[in-house]
Image (tube, helix red, strand yellow):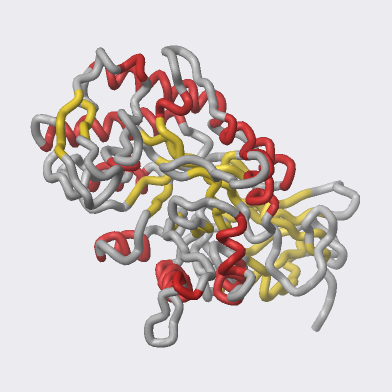
Amino acid sequence: MGMVTYICDEVGPPKPKYGSLRRAIEKLAKWELGDVLYLRVDWRDIQKEPGKLEFPEHWNLTFEMAKKYGKRVAFRVQLMSPVIEPQSLPDFLNDKVPMVKLGTTDEIGIKGKVHYAPRYDHPEFMKAFKEMDNLLAKKYNGHELVEYVDTCMYGFWGEGHTWPFEGSPLPDYYTARDTFVEIFEHQAANWSKTPLTTNTQPDYNHVGNAEVLEKTIRSYNWLRTDTIFIENEQIDVLSNRPPWIGATIEQGITKGNTGDLRVVDGLMRNENIIAHVKDVGPNYFSLWNWHDISLENLMSYHDKYPKALNNLAITIGYRVRPSWIWSFEKEGYPGLVLGLVNDGISGVPGSLRIHVRDTANTFEVSGSLDPGYPLPGKVRQAVIMLPKDTQWEGLRLSAVIEIKGVRRPVTWACAQELEDDGTLILKRNL
């Protein structure tokens, strides 16, 4: 969970007027409000020849800074983008994959550009894509720094559409649907330890988005959206997703200059966005100035008006605490009943696993809640039975979250001070 600092979007990484790219990325990575560093690159940016990946400087710097500052990384590889010439595909595919002309538009992308889309169903495209994803997953599936990976989808920015162009480069709906189901299933098999996030884009171009979305949820992968204001269908999918499914919202925020704030009815645009983000209940939100990435641009707003972003940062995702802890004994066996509460705005995107152990580490008892629980604003009770004649006072209570079989520690969101290892020492307080 957390706030996602954008390091690179579809027009590239920061372009500092002064100083180095390293310094610009380090400033973004160091900012305390951000938890995850995000990269959006084109296929051609990470692969120049078959059988080998070559990552750009800003990619490598991002992973370096994530490790240095205790952050994590999320990324997307675009198969198609309207803001790049000539296309997102690597050059070695130019003569192998047919390109279908879509036309020109001033609605998105480079003005005057003639847009082409690849035949995603072509054997050479599928072969090359699967190889690229295999190489990427071999390196990053289950990587200690990787938080999630965006699903590669159809169309512009990999969002699942080529609006405003109708139709698709594929011959019919069924070919398109089967193609993108195959692309998704290949990714789902590869990314067995790391969540994939699939866009909730309505199927404007009839390429099987609904089927891909269904398969995403049923395989315990997650959701993402690039807007919460355009298509109402996206809001319904996000807000009513199963509680164990994570969600990330991308929405650019304005700078802090008076002319950028766009105040309507006394409410700044950014405050309006953040209020609606909370309504959907996501796990992640973007810290992003659309196509103008720099810490200075983010701080120009946050320095003047910190309240909205700061409040979102301490409520987004799940915030779990043992609100009640009762003790009991049955036939000489002591037990604990935990009344667990979630102060966040989303469910737990996986299973919360509770651990109880003694200080000397002579025993440890653990068990999992149902995936997604406790729900926001609700109490979920759990019973932990202890070894016979155990004294419960002084025991250590901790939690981990399990996602796709991978367990990571959770920090209790309670008022009491925790130990250095994140455990809460049990004591009588009532």
- Residue 270 located left or right of residue 158: right
Percent across and percent down for residue 337 are 67, 69
Identity of the residue drawn at 55% across and 44% down = 15
333 and 52: which is toward the camera:
52
Q: Please name the residue shown 47% across and 65% down the image.
A: 254
Q: Residue furthest front?
A: 17
Judge from the rendering whether residue 111 lies leftward or rightward of residue 267; answer left or right: left
Q: Can the viewer see residue 108 in this picture?
A: yes
Q: Is residue 388 above or below residue 117?
A: below
Q: Quadrant of residue 207?
A: top left
**278 or 215: nearer the eye?**
278
Quadrant of the rendering where the N terminus is positioned = bottom right
Task: Provide residue 176's location: percent of width, then percent of height.
Answer: 17, 34
In the displayed structure, 307 sits above or below 4; it is below
Say how many tags the image has.
Answer: 0
Task: Report the residue at 46% width, 54% height from top.
Answer: 246
Quarter of the C terminus within the rendering: bottom right
- Near-viewer residue (357 or 224): 224
Residue 147 visible somewhere in the drawing: no
Could you say where residue 426 lies in the image, as x and y percent from the top left? Answer: 81, 67
Q: Relative to residue 284, is residue 185 drawn left or right?
A: left
Instruction: Give left or right: position of 381 versus 346.
Output: right
Q: Position of residue 108 (x, y in %)?
A: 27, 49
Above or below residue 249? Residue 190 is above
Q: Nearer the viewer, residue 298 or 4?
A: 298
